[in-house]
Image (cartoon, rainbow, N blue to C red):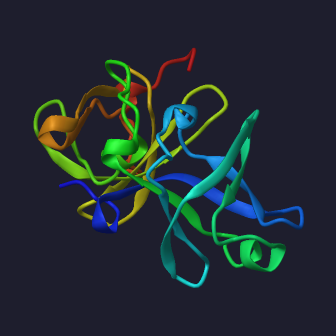
Amino acid sequence: MKKSEPNNYYPVAKILKSHGVRGEIKIEPLTPYFNLCDFSGGCLVTDRFSGESIRLVRALNIQGRFAYMSLIGADNRDESDKLTGGMILLKRGQLPELPEGEHFVFDLIGLSVITEDGQNIGILSDIREGPVYDWYEVTLTSKGTRHLVPAVSDFVRKLDVENGRVIIRPASGLFGETEEPTEEGFHADD
C-alpha cells in the first residue's frame, strides 16, 4: 500500500552542503510546513554513505526556500561535509497537523492509481513540482513505464489516502496509448 521510511521516520529536508566552518548545514525543506515541525526531540540524519544517526538540533534558521541547521556532533566543516547529500527525517509525531485536504508527499507515494470505473492503472511513484501545478508520476502495472499526470481536478478526481488509492480520469493518449483516428474523426477545422 504505502511506502514509508525505515523505523517510521519521514523525510522533511534534503542536506545540500556544509555552510561555514562551524558545522552548519544548508538544507532544502521538502514541505511548506517545515517551519512547524518539532525538532525538540532530535532528528534522524542520513549521510551520503548510507549512515544514519539521531542528532539533536542546536539551531535552525529558515531563510526563504532554504534553511540553515546546526547539529550537535557536527561542530566543524569536516563533520558537516560528510552529511552533504543526506536527508533530515522526523517521526510522525514531530510533524505538524496539516489543513484539511493537504497531504505529505510520502503519504501519497505508493498509492494505487485507478480509473473512475475501477481499472487498476499502476502506482503513484513520484510527485514533481511544476511552475503552475504538480505532476504525478504513475508507473503502469502492465508495462512498468512511467507517465506524468497533471495533478489537477480534470485528471485527478480524488485522493483517497485512507483506502490507499488515487482515482483518476485518464484522457486519450495520457498513458502512451493512442487511438487511430477514423475517417469520421477528421474535421476540417482540426
Rendered location of residue 39, percent (x, y): 50, 47
Location of the N terminus (image quadrant):
bottom left
Rendered location of residue 69, percent (x, y): 69, 52
Question: In the depicted view, which residue is nearer to us: 10 or 36?
Answer: 36
Q: Residue at x 32, y 18 (%)?
A: 100
Question: In the depicted view, which residue is nearer to us: 8 or 111?
Answer: 8
Q: Residue at x 80, y 80 (%)?
A: 78
Q: Is residue 174 visible?
A: no
Rendered location of residue 29, percent (x, y): 61, 45
List the single residue furthest toward the bottom: 49
Location of the C terminus (image quadrant):
top right
Vertical side of 186 occupied by 54: above or below:
below
Left or right of 77? Residue 181 is left
**Number of numbered discs overlaid on the protein picture:** 0
Vertical side of 105 occupied by 87: above or below:
below
Question: In the depicted view, which residue is nearer to us: 24 or 40?
Answer: 40
Q: Quadrant of residue 66?
A: top right
Question: In the depicted view, which residue is nearer to us: 125 or 85?
Answer: 85
Q: Quadrant of residue 123?
A: bottom left
Left or right of 108? Residue 189 is right
Q: Residue at x 60, y 69 (%)?
A: 86
Left or right of 44? Residue 61 is right
Q: Is residue 187 visible?
A: yes
Vertical side of 66 occupied by 89: above or below:
below
List the single residue furthest toward the top: 189
Q: Residue at x 24, y 63 (%)?
A: 142
Rendered location of residue 140, percent (x, y): 30, 58
List the single residue furthest toward the right: 20
